[in-house]
Image (spheres, helix red, strand yellow):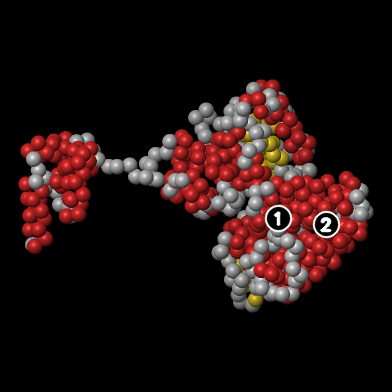
Amino acid sequence: MHKCLTIGRVAAQRRAGLSPAQGRLLRRLADADPEPGVARRARGLLGEERVSRQTAAKWSARFAEHGADGLRDLPRAGRPPTHGDESVRSILVAPLLAPTARWTSHTLAGLTGQSQTAVVRAWRQVFGAGAAHPAGPLPSGGLALVGARCDASNSVLVLAAHATAVPAERTTPFMRSPRRPPLQALLAADLLASALPPDAAPPGLDAVPDLVATVRRRLGSRTPLFVLSRRPLPAPATAVPGVEYLHLAPDDRWQGLLETLVRRCTATPQPHLAALQQRLMVWARGDARPFEWLADGAPDRADRRPAPPGGEPRPTGQVVADAVLASVLDRIAAGRLAAGDRITESSLSRAVHASRGHVREALLVLASNGLVDLEPRRGALVPAPQVADVVETYAVRRALGALLVRRAAQSAPGALAPVEQALTALVTVAATGDPRASGEADIRFQDALALSTGMRRVPRMFVALSAQIRLFTAVMGVRYAYSVPQMVRDDTLLLQQVAARDEAAALRTWHTKMDDAVGYMLTQLGSPGGPPPRR
């Protein structure tokens, strides 16, 4: 009762403070204004609708100063109900200009000067409501992204069909897939490439067939290829046999392909996508040429698994084990797993798209290599490595690496081509300034050097130790990477010495490199057991 009297008294005071002209204006707004919010506020100022004292004071002040316009909604800074083309473009391009490849909506909001809500809304607008679909059916099996090109006139993706079926649709949103960030960056490259000068790109009739022909030579004539093009290609450019060309509708955004690619490109190895993302970020920082990319290490046939040293086919358990380990490392890096945590088979089965039986077999393989712990009635656990484990692993790696460096220095020059490619990838990644990605590229360089020797057993043991190092850096929270410029100099010098067959100099460089790596790790762990790293 008291509250009603108070509200009635406030309403009477409000009406008493209005001039006749203001009262007539409020009456018209309350009865006929098309904006419901304005009519409701006018009725509140007339005492016909119950509002709080603070709300009434706010709208009274605005009405007194601005009249009818004072009762209308003001635009909300950072949260526009719709996005203009420039706003959306800046959000879509931001992943290419971020300081590292591990960006989030929060990171991009700070980079673009917009709110995180605005970034997410733009993503929903383009990737959800604006989803695009090719003008033709894609195969029922999985796809591998094997080539891409973006220039001022068009953007093209080359996809290889695989026999492996696409996993059934999951309830997990595609935006949580680890494949999403690199593919999102790839589609964003179209926006930067469209700003290139027209003469920066060779004629379209030559560029696309050359790209497709290169992919065809790598994969063989029996692998079905699909070319997705933002624009229809002229007839001469589509004259490659055994290739199906699909384009988008004129009104579709190229970036709207994201969900289709994330859900369908299940046969593309995650390391290939990570390398692609690093290449894109380097290109976006000032390369005036069109962007062109071919997947490294493509197999001779799309349905054939890569062979390890010695040429034997990789067993299914090892293939799944590699995928399981990658998933576990990603979860550790994201803070979802820590030392001693239980690793559930069901979650891994969903993550790697394999049966629980295959996942269980993969965990046994990882346990035999010390990469997970198996305990009765608890299952698989994330191991908790100690400082002594780091010292022991690097001691073995140092000795095995010395043997491999000697053998590599005796190999034919052509055998070092994959090592040269790995060094180029390291230099590219190092230019981004990302220590974590640079450390990973350095490990891949070392593995490539080991595999180039053609030995059957030692390279396998060496690559297994690489997995141990990845586990140490993830679980123990340390960076593998010592000084990134020093890492590039060491690897460049090592390859030069191996190629020159200077075995003694290459061994000295290798031993120094290993001493630096273990020294930096032990320093981070607070142990005095390692030699001081170089400055």
Report which quarter residue 414 is drawn in: top right
Q: Residue 450, which numbered label? A: 2
Q: Residue 22, which numbered label? A: none
Q: Amino acid at mark 1?
A: Val
Farthest front residue?
A: 535
Q: Is the N terminus in the top left, top right, bottom left or bottom right quadrant?
A: bottom left
Q: Are marks 1 and 2 in contact (CB under 8 Å)?
A: no
**Whole-percent x and y of residue 120?**
46, 47
Report which quarter residue 295 is drawn in: top right
Dot 2 lies on which element?
Answer: helix
Q: Is residue 448 above or below residue 289?
A: below
Farthest bottom residue?
A: 376
**Whole-percent x and y of residue 50?**
15, 52
Q: Amino acid at mark 2?
A: Ala
Nearer-the-camera pick, 465 or 310: 465
Q: What residue sits 66% from the left and 22% below the top? A: 235
Report whether 327 appears left or right of 533.
left
